[in-house]
Amino acid sequence: MLNPSVKRNQDRFSSEFMFRMTKKEKQEVVTICDHLEKLKFSPNLPQVFTEYGVVMAANVLNSNRAIEISKIVVKTFIKLREMLVNHRTLAIKLSELESRLQDHDGHIQSLFEAIRQLMVPPESKSTRIGFITDRGK
């Protein structure tokens, strides 16, 4: 149902909405997703819809089931986008923390060096107390 609809409306699906997987990508997907095992033996490379392509496919398909499925897929893309934004924010925060820790490492190292210097007893600069006499000559 989807493939014939896409073929009939080819002008709606430019490369920013849909593209073909490479052989390597197909092999990776088949390896990761057990339910796509039949795809392993297909000579054809699958077509993949981008986030905008899913919205376009929802406009092309007319059955109630297709509309419901496309809504689910669109919601999934929205959720993925939110997750990516959250992960990007987390990655930025981790980078900031890492740079702060690197600064702290330098400060901690300086602190250890100062403590080590304090642990070394100072050289005795004291002189003997008393009178110096000439008798010992």
Image (cartoon, rainbow, N blue to C red):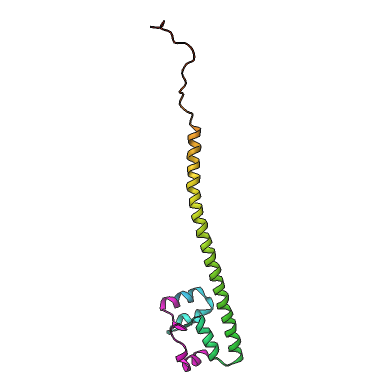
Q: Nearer the viewer, residue 127 or 43?
A: 127
Q: Where is residue 28 shown, x and y percent of the image?
A: 46, 74
Residue 19, placed above or below residue 91:
below
Label total for image:
0
Q: Residue at x 49, y 36 (%)?
A: 116
Residue 72, placed above or below residue 92:
below
Q: Is residue 112 visible?
A: yes
Q: Residue at x 48, y 31 (%)?
A: 120
Q: Residue at x 44, y 10 (%)?
A: 132
Q: Is residue 46 visible?
A: no
Q: Is residue 60 magenta?
A: no
> Which quadrant does the C terminus fall into?
top left
Q: Is residue 10 magenta?
A: yes
Question: Most extreme residue toward the top, as rendered?
Answer: 135
Q: Nearer the viewer, residue 16 or 1?
A: 16
Q: Where is residue 70 shown, x and y percent of the image?
A: 57, 85
Residue 45 occupies quadrant: bottom left
Q: Where is residue 59 shown, x and y percent of the image?
A: 54, 90
Question: Most extreme residue toward the left, as rendered?
Answer: 137
Residue 100, placed above or below residue 73:
above
Q: Residue at x 43, y 80 (%)?
A: 21
Q: Nearer the viewer, residue 115 or 5?
A: 115
Q: Where is residue 134 shown, x and y percent of the image?
A: 41, 7
**Start-end of magenta stretch:** 1-26
